Amino acid sequence: MSNPGENDCLLGTESTPITITDSPVTDPGSVVKSIEGTNAAILGQRKLDSKASGALKKSSRYRSRSLSASSTDSYSSASYSSSDEDDVSPREKTQKNYTGFSDFCVKNIEQCVFGRREIEIAEQEMPGIMALRKRAVEDKPLKNAKIVGCTHINAQTAVLIETLVELGAQVRWCACNIFSTQNEVAAALAGAGYPIFAWRGETEEDFWWCIDRCINAENWQSNMILDDGGDATHLMLKKYPAMFKMIKGIVEESVTGVHRLYQLSKAQKLTVPAMNVNDSVTKTKFDNLYSCRESIIDSLKRSTDVMFGGKQVVLCGYGEVGKGCCQALKGLGCVVYITEIDPICALQACMDGYRVVKLNEIIRYVDIVVTATGNKNVVTREHMDKMKNGCVVCNMGHSNTEIDVNSLRTPDLTWEKVRSQVDHIIWPDGKRIILLAEGRLVNLSCSSLPSFVVSITAATQALALIELFNAPHGRYKSDVYLLPKKMDEYVASLHLPTFDAHLTELSDDQAKYMGLNKAGPFKPNYYRY
């Protein structure tokens, strides 16, 4: 499917015109966003550039502080145009792209020009997935694949979606996180004719409605699922069991989703094969460790402007995500404490120079609390009652269960919205803590991920889909599998040319001595990188 040009991206919306105003609305923590231009079609490049310039100016507007119940506005510090919107729910609008296509639900289809530019920027920094697209485009290995996708929707994911389509797949896509969608990117995908159902700041009802719209569509029977967190898999299994039986394979990339799959397998409720790409080496080491090492700093800086030098930080969980976060925080001068349940991970933390403690021992003294466990109620109301004034609390795990945010929604506490995804929670004595993204994934809610690392994950996901879709009957049972190591190595090789890296080749004698094939795989499955 070809992408529309900038000048023919949309027809506009058929909703009621919006008055430009800065007056308060029902939620006192929100401000009405200004909308420039009309709903008519974009007529020329000069007009496009003028519109883009106007949106750039408006996105930097000051957001006043006021009492609010939540942070579900649609501003994204990672995407400059997301604040240039109205307050009408996308579900109440009728929108069409330039061809008249309307099988989508996004915040504002008029943002498709901005989104296309963001996708183009991401493509430049995603060499692996672009190389895979180029190599496999003639073979169309995903021809006849109908993929339901439930992931974060940002510029990097858009590159993956368009790659899957180039490789022959049909897709329907929704978001796995209510705060991580880049609205302009969702608009660009809708403008290109893809069924996209996502916007930043969805309600819980919106979230499940979007997933349902992806799964249950007229003249559509999906045969593959690409999931991040297991929500699409969960909904299809519970609500559409007959559809679920038609699935050829599931690809899952998060700790939470993989845990759900293993639970289903253990209970003998998993009737299709699933690929656990979260624990593939390329995903675990690069997306979890290297990406989080950069994005934890980015998200905390953008949301709080905090100075890290000398701050005391407790990091809950010393897995790959925790290791990456700790490296970055320690490198900027933080005093870092670790909480762990696993003695091996705890010993690693000790050897890396961190103190391993119980959260209760140091919660009164720390300046920043970061969760990265994938568990529930890691930080409880009791912990937050003991925190010092101004303590920053955030989550780097996939699930929003690690911080017990519901325990903070009580009459004795006041929520004060400071800026997008930043809330002060104020105690009766005046003490306040700073909660980021309401306990959801902070790096995707308050910043963005490095595109290069996402390229590695995207290539892993694409290869897993190709493998499951084309596998002969009987190769994979109804169970959870790891990505074959040969594919892991192939993903890494796709990215090496970026660094002008040159691999050494084994001689025949060396390969025989090591008992290896010269073309790999080069490590046994039990090898720990």
Image: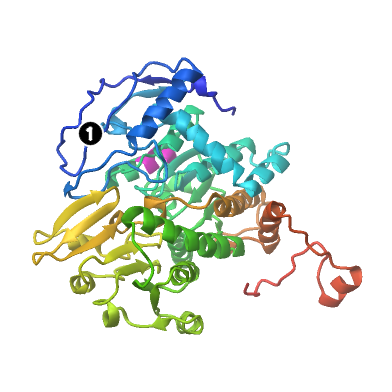
The residue that disc 1 covers is 32
Q: What secondary structure is the stretch in magenta mostly built from?
A: helix
Given the image, on which type of amino acid does mark 1 rest?
Val
**Quarter holding the N terminus?**
top right
x and y, in percent, of residue 381 in the image: 20, 69
Residue at image location 20% in from the left, 68% down from the top? 389
Q: How many marks?
A: 1
Residue at image location 32% in from the left, 68% down from the top? 368
The image shows residue 56, relative to residue 370, as above or below, that is above
In the picture, measured across the screen, residue 248 lies left or right of residue 182, that is right
In the picture, measured across the screen, residue 467 lies left or right of residue 75, that is right
Q: Magenta residues?
A: 210-216
Q: Quadrant of residue 37 in the image?
A: top left
x and y, in percent, of residue 442 in the image: 37, 57
x and y, in percent, of residue 364 in the image: 23, 77
**Quarter holding the C terminus?**
bottom right
Q: Quadrant of residue 409 in the image?
A: bottom left
Reply yes or no: does residue 215 show up in magenta. Answer: yes
Reply yes or no: does residue 110 show up in magenta. Answer: no
